[in-house]
Amino acid sequence: MKKQYKRFRLRTVSAMVAMAFVANAWAVDPFTVRDIRVEGLQRVEPGTIFASLPFRIGEQYNDEKGSAAIRALFGLGLFKDVRLEVNGDVLVVIVEERPTVADVEFAGSREFDKDVLKKALREIGLTEGRPYDQSLADRAEQELKRQYINKSLYGAEIVTTVTPIERNRVNLTFTVTEGEPARIKEIRVVGNKAFSESTLRGLFDLDTGGMLSWYTKSDRYSRAKLTADMEALRSYYLSRGYLEFRIDSTQVAISPNKQDITITVNVTEGERYVVSAVRLDGNYLGKEDEFKSLVTIKPGEAYNADKVAETTKAFNDYFGNFGYAFANVEARPEIDRANNRVAFVLVAEPSRRAYVRRVNIAGNNRTRDEVIRREFRQFEASWYDADKIKRSRDRVDRLGYFKEVNIETSDVPGAPDQVDLTITIVEKPTGSLQLGAGFSSAEKLALSFSVKQENAFGTGNYLGVEVNTSKYNRTIAFSSVNPYFTPDGVSRAVDVYYRTSRPYEDQGGNYQIATAGAGLRFGIPFSELDTVFFGGALERTEIKPGTNIPAAYLAYAERFGYKSVSVPLSIGWGRDDRDSAIAPTSGRYQRVAGEVGVAGDTRYVRSNYQLQQYIPLNKQFTLAFNGELGWGKGLGGQAFPVFKHFYSGGLGSVRGFDQGTLGPKDVTGSTIGGPKKITMNAEVITPFPGAGNDRSLRMFGFIDAGNVYGENEKFRLSELRASVGVGLSWISPIGPLRIAAAHPIRKFPGDRIQRMQFQIGTSF
């Protein structure tokens, strides 16, 4: 039989349109495939071709299967040309591979880190090693423009350069001309009557710029920020009685040169309404009195949407405490427009009671399940309890190992009285290796090194090595904390340390107080916020004589020895419900610590109490108070050890006075501290002008008072030093930075004044 030779080819650009014509023009008689050969492959594996063909060796081939094969091979996205050739009963598949992307580079990009742009392109499928085509490059340009528009760089231009290289690869270079960012020139609020335009604009994070706009970028338009500002505006009106307030439109206009943006917000205020009555309706499980106590909507007061939402949430949570996971509470307004009054009917339907069948954990790739489960207060096979679930979520979040913690409730199919809980977490790096340096007006140059792992090997344990050096205080410490030393949540901490210190004096001197020790501490949780600590340590302290050593130190050393060994036992209590440990705006922090030297060469008792209270005055202003009392006394006829003295003055105590210089002085004039201390601080904190509502950069005004007293002196308010001033706090990449300018308003002869002070890492 004479062999026939037919060839047909389908190009990428006209593949789907011409397929029918190709099949008809180059039709072949059906035959049994004896062999399949593939030509033109460079990087693609032959198995990829064979797996995509709709026929195998030994099967019948026809034109329909040939067309399907071409469609399948083009569908892989790996080839820019595909041909099928029939040579007798042998089918030859000839392909031309698309070039692959060898490298992606960016030229002229200053606003973004290159890794950020590469990540954005990777998400649309353009990255090293992937096939390249022009449509993908066009999508990449559009994605890059979108990234720049999000940064208010509306005039950014992008040019793509494709450079072919060996082995059928290409290099892509995106040349960016960023231009100047578009800035908000004007923000207008139209339709307002009750509140001034300047008051309403003050609610926004977006603004027309200030002297710190280079840092906050608040004058750059962002859709997300505008949406948040509109919510702030709506909340402002709804919380002040304007029940029917609405935002009619927001118009964003950009100038022809793409440099200036104008935002216009059109609002309708409506009338201001006063609450006339609040009634309960529906099924309240016979606990109407308990639910009434949760109502924060007060008749006679202006309508406040926040209080309505707070009340309905409190009702839902209270239903949840009894197992009603699907309770529905609706606040129905009855509006009297003639008198501008509104009554609320709180309608409740508890639905059905539910058990928690299973608690699932998702997202913990490194952290062990038990680390999360031991924080849960909602148990499986128990009544659904909203309070315990919230408490569980907060406890997991407070571990500090996760970026996000969310709990979702889902029905159990076929079991209407059961639910499953799924806690989804997003882990964050919990280990750190830090090398750093800091400078303060008191400490001068301080170098630090630390290796810390807060979630060692996913067990929830803490391991740390810390080294710190400064002019006055040097430390090397090793720490280990097991937060669940016992199944009941008793923590155990082991510390080994070596510290050297001396008072803050500018007279120079090379004397030192060196303390080496090791300690063991335990923490017992008594509630969700309260923990009691106790422990003991073995310490060896040496007073090393040198130039300018205070006479009191020499006198103590001559009486009790230059070296002393002590066994201090410690006990303390802490409670912290602040909303943030670094930049708090609400909540309270309390700490009590006591230490008793019970054995060795020293006998003493030392105690300290600290209270911090943060009160939010509004969205921008926070009132903060700090108080601290310290007291110590020698026991058994011994003097209180000089190396356990308290010090005061400067940042962290009474600003405006030189660091650590308040209190008793010896005959040489050196400050020696004392066993009694009192410190009081008050601050009004607000975002820095021009920084919007950015909490990382804030300014504050303050009043400080305090002093240190000797062992035989009484606490006398008449001897308190006091100061007033202003300051700046910045949560910088290397730690909280605070700068204070203070003016002493109560000082005494001999006090050392320092009006400008700064430090990294102090609290008050």
Image (spheres, rainbow, N blue to C red):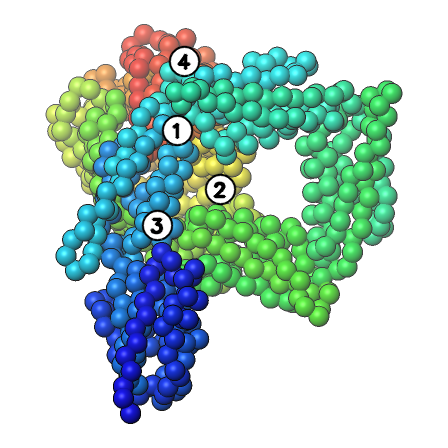
Residue lying at 41% horizontally and 53% vertically, measured from the top left: 427
Kind of element beneath mark 1: loop
Q: Tell me the kind of residue under disc 4.
A: Gly
Residue 12: x, y in percent?
34, 59
Q: Quadrant of the C terminus?
A: top left
Residue at the spot of label 1: 154
Crowd tier of the residue under label 3, counting other residues whose Cα lies within 10 Å: few below 14, some 14–19, many 20 or above: some
* Residue 87 placement, left or right of 322: left
Lower position in the chain sequence, tag 1 or tag 2 = 1
Q: Tell me the kind of residue under disc 1.
A: Tyr
- The answer to whether 130 is drawn above or below residue 675 in the figure is below
Residue lying at 34% horizontally and 64% vertically, measured from the top left: 10
Q: Tell me the kind of residue under disc 2.
A: Gly
Residue 143: x, y in percent?
38, 42
Spatial CA distance of label 2 from label 3 is 58 Å
Residue at the spot of label 4: 725
* Residue 40 placement, left or right of 185: left
